[in-house]
Amino acid sequence: MREAMGILQHHDAITGTEKQHVAFDYARQLNKGFTDCGNVANLALRKLMEKETIGVTNEDISLQSCMLLNISSCEITENNNTFVVTLYNPLSRKVSRYVRLPVKGNGDSYTIYDPSGNLIKTQTLPIPHSVLKIPGRTSLAKEEVVFLAKDLPMMGYRSYYVSEKNANEISGMKMKKFRNNYIHDKERTKIRIGDVTVDQSFWWY
């Protein structure tokens, strides 16, 4: 990876002015670097898990990486009803990050538990249309399950247990109403305020 990153400091790689076959070779070198680094990280994580899990050996642990999350694509999360997500924090301080898991979006919801068995709050969001139409994207995922991985240990990992919940088990959202019957000012004037419905939308430009 270090060698590939050194080569990609060339001005053609940075600006994108190289010929197409050169761009393909840059991508090949980066992919090889990512693969090699992934193998090292997987081996290290398996060693850590082996020490903390009773009756499990290094060979029993299988880890796979989702390298296409930047286009909301992950074969593991899309094609399995239950799976474990392991997050590694390489920094020397605790961090909190939102995690997005691509799913097919068949009207089902997901439950996520932390290592202590605590239920994690989740939200299922549609994948933007612009992402769905990215050229070359073959993923069937239409939605993403989002949750907050809070206080990941420094230079450590944490595993989250994800399982699909049938649509019949999903409880509908209840409308929240904010109400204030009256407000008094210094002059003892009484003001009545009706119910207010709050709606939130996300836009971009």
Image: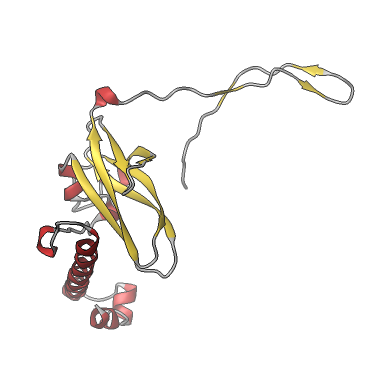
**Does residue 153 appear left or right of residue 192 in this picture?**
left
Residue 110 % position (x, y): 28, 36
**Does residue 123 appear left or right of residue 133 in this picture?**
right
Residue 86 % position (x, y): 27, 55
Residue in the image at 21% along x and 39% along y: 104
Taking depth in this image into account, of 15 and 74 the one nearest to the observer is: 74
**Residue 128 lies in what quarter of the image?**
top left
**Does residue 145 appear left or right of residue 57 in this picture?**
right
Q: List the single residue furthest toward the right.
A: 187
Q: Is residue 56 visible?
A: yes
Residue 45 % position (x, y): 23, 65
**Residue 97 lies in what quarter of the image?**
bottom left
Q: List the single residue furthest toward the front.
A: 54
Which image quarter is the N terminus in?
bottom left
Taking depth in this image into account, of 181 and 130 the one nearest to the observer is: 181
Taking depth in this image into account, of 173 and 16 the one nearest to the observer is: 173
* Figure label count: 0
Residue in the image at 22% along x and 61% along y: 49
Depicted 121 relative to depicted 12: above or below: above
Residue 127 % position (x, y): 31, 42
Q: Is residue 127 visible?
A: no
Depicted 4 relative to depicted 119: above or below: below
**Residue 132 lies in what quarter of the image?**
top left
